[in-house]
């Protein structure tokens, strides 16, 4: 190769290196918006129009926002915030419906009769601690339950997730979702996918992996090691088929979240389960106020079926479900 | 070697890198920056944006790491601006990487995101702001308050009536929301049918280095030069004035040595009088700030003009 040819090759190499070293340019939103609104200087106009002509993705976004902005400018719609007023009215109405009413009542709870006197004294359940007795009396007197905000928040995440699964044949996690659980070794359940094997992964609230099932044949798996009490966790299940893998839930669907009951409440409930195994009322209130709403629902349903026709038993169930 | 001026405003975490005296110290410093600072930020950012099971997650993470390594290398060689907060820089690079990935993978969602953002910044009822790195939105009167993420019913969001839907959503939440949660809410509504675009299809015009190597073998210097001549003037200037040969010197002299262009022709192409080009001949290649001042542009605009030039050339050469 003569000197002239070497220099030609060096030039080609310089150009090729220059071209291949480039990280792709993509227009960020601010630049697209400025272009659409006519706020770009002449250089940015050249950059946007040049790149939009080359890049299908950015070109599509520029054209779409141009169309949208033009429509928006032509029909500004200044509706009053009626929705906010309606929402506020609804909240007021619900609060009014849940306002406590009963002050004296009597309920059958297993083999005993529980009574609440006019001055708030509870009788009929022997062996309750002072705190447990106060909690039950307050729940009966007010007809409302003090569900922890964390449980309510979790429940909403569960509702949001479930609302994304509309088809009967969809692959979805079933439990635990949007709840606080008592056991620190949760059992995970999900819907079946024909011909699939599965893998469950559990992450901490900081998205660190904390448990991994490996490949499973069944649609149910119990974590072999206890999770840290008081922690909130996110989990996903993956269906593995020859045709590929499907993970549920996956973005943009909300995460499948749950929490493990904290140490203090877990001990308190364990003690109550031992001392009052047949008191649906005491256990229901304890579960509810620890945020373990699924177990509380089960206990209050039992209580309601033992007290058919009782508005007081029904009110506890309604209070639980309203959170 | 990094200058004293550049050390001003430099993240203390980067001090060990810029002070590295040999390859071993440099490797240790980079390892610390990537493992202890960058990796947790990248993982957390990608988890939030894409979820933990996105199949391309590791590829995106690898791409971000590669960009960081390049940036750290530039920083240590003193050819990059100082970074005030490395963690913030990592978060921004990761955000853009995830954003580009989602834009390519979910084009309908990207369009929707742009429309929502446009409404939030143009409708007087709403506002969009940054709160501790998070893009946050809500009613205008909530501006600068932190977001309080909460689950919402997707039926509140109607992509055909974004303004009304936003009013409904914010009335329900009573407080600001992360912008990306709002986009996800609209995307989750049944009226948006996302057709996932295979990444390969969307990126056809982005040629890989190996593709360029193949291309180069088919091209002659004359072909390449003719294509450069066809570029818009600013793009041509941004490309040529900074063009370097393998040793780091300017590639412009190669144009004259190989007879592809005279110095006068080069001067005309880069928009500089011949006498002036001659006077700066030994200063070539010019850095981006110098090119920016010559073009009346910002440094970032010079970088973008050069990227435009590259992609235009790539497109034209790939069609040959």
Image: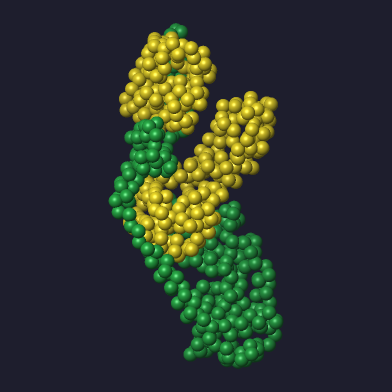
Is residue A220 found left or right of B237 in the rendered image?
right
Q: Residue at x 58, y 84 (%)?
A: A140
* Rendering coords of residue B155 (x, y %): 39, 63
* Rendering coords of residue B73 (x, y %): 58, 30
* Rendering coords of residue B201 (x, y %): 36, 40
Camera-side residue: A284 or B239?
B239
Q: Is A61 above or below relative to A53?
A: below
Q: Is B296 above or below relative to B68?
A: above
Q: Residue at x 39, y 23 (%)?
A: B236
Colour of chain B, in one word, is: yellow
| Colour treatment of the image | by chain
Q: Is B279 above or below relative to A307?
A: above
Is residue A72 found left or right of A290 in the rendered image?
left
Q: Is B5 above or below relative to A260?
A: above
Is residue A261 at least partly visible in the picture? yes
Is residue A196 at least partly visible in the picture? no
Q: Residue at x 57, y 83 (%)?
A: A142
Camera-side residue: B310 or B81?
B81
The image quarter in which residue B276 lies: top left
Is residue A277 found left or right of B252 in the rendered image?
right
Q: Count of labels shown?
A: 0
Residue at the limit of the structure toward the top, as seen here: A2
Colour of chain A, in one word, is: green
Q: Residue at x 43, y 73 (%)?
A: A89
Q: Which quarter of the rendered picture does the C terminus of chain B lie within? A: top left
Q: Which quarter of the rendered picture does the N terminus of chain B lie within? A: top right
* Rendering coords of residue A146 (x, y %): 58, 75
């Amino acid at each position: 190769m003569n000197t002239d040819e070497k220099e030609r090759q060096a030039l080609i190499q310089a150009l090729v290196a220059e071209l291949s070293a480039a990280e792709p340019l993509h227009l960020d939103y601010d630049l697209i918006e400025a272009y659409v609104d006519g706020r770009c200087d002449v250089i940015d106009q050249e950059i946007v129009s040049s790149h939009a002509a080359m890049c299908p993705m950015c070109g599509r976004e520029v054209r779409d926002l141009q169309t949208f902005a033009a429509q928006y400018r032509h029909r500004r719609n200044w509706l009053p915030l009626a929705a906010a007023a309606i929402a506020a009215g609804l909240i007021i109405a619900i609060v009014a419906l849940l306002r406590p009413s009963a002050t004296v009542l009597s309920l059958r709870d297993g083999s005993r009769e529980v009574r609440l006197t006019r001055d708030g004294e509870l009788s009929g359940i022997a062996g309750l601690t002072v705190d447990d007795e106060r909690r039950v009396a307050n729940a009966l007197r007010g007809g409302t339950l003090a569900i922890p905000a964390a449980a309510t928040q979790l429940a909403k995440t569960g509702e949001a997730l479930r609302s994304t699964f509309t088809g009967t044949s969809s692959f979805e996690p079933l439990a635990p979702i949007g709840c606080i659980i008592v056991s620190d070794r949760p059992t995970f359940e999900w819907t079946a996918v024909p011909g699939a094997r599965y893998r469950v992964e559990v992450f901490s609230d900081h998205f660190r992996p904390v448990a991994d099932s490996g490949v499973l044949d069944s649609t149910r798996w119990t974590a072999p090691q206890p999770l840290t009490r008081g922690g909130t966790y996110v989990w996903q299940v993956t269906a593995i088929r020859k045709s590929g893998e499907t993970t549920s839930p996956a973005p943009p669907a909300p995460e499948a979240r749950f929490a493990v009951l904290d140490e203090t409440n877990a001990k308190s409930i364990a003690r109550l389960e031992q001392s009052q195994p047949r008191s649906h009322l005491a256990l229901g209130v304890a579960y509810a106020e620890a945020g373990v709403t699924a177990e509380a629902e089960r206990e209050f349903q039992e209580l309601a079926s033992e007290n058919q026709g009782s508005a007081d038993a029904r009110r506890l169930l309604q209070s639980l479900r309203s959170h | 070697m990094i200058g004293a001026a550049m050390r001003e405003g430099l993240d203390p975490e980067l001090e060990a890198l810029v002070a590295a005296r040999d390859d071993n110290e440099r490797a240790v410093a980079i390892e610390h920056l990537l493992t202890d600072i960058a990796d947790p930020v990248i993982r957390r950012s990608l988890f939030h944006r894409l979820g933990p099971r996105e199949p391309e997650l590791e590829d995106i993470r690898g791409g971000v790491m590669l960009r960081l390594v390049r940036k750290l290398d530039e920083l240590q060689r003193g050819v990059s601006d100082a970074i005030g907060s490395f963690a913030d820089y990592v978060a921004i690079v990761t955000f853009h990487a995830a954003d580009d990935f989602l834009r390519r993978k979910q084009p309908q969602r990207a369009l929707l995101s742009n429309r929502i953002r446009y409404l939030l910044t143009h409708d007087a009822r709403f506002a969009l702001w940054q709160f501790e790195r998070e893009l946050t939105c809500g009613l205008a009167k909530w501006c600068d308050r932190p977001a309080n993420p909460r689950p919402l019913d997707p039926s509140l969001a109607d992509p055909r009536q974004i303004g009304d839907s936003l009013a409904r959503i914010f009335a329900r939440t009573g407080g600001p929301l992360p912008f990306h949660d709002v986009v996800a809410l609209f995307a989750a509504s049944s009226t948006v049918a996302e057709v996932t675009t295979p990444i390969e299809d969307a990126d056809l015009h982005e040629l890989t280095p190996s593709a360029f190597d193949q291309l180069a073998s088919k091209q002659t210097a004359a072909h390449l030069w003719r294509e450069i001549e066809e570029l818009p003037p600013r793009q041509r200037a941004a490309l040529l004035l900074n063009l370097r040969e393998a040793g780091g010197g300017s590639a412009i002299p190669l144009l004259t040595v190989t007879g592809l262009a005279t110095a006068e022709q080069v001067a005309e192409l880069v928009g500089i009088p011949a006498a002036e080009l001659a006077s700066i001949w030994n200063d070539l290649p010019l850095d981006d700030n110098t090119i920016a001042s010559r073009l009346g542009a910002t440094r970032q605009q010079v970088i973008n003009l050069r990227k435009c030039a590259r992609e235009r050339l790539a497109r034209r050469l790939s069609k040959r």
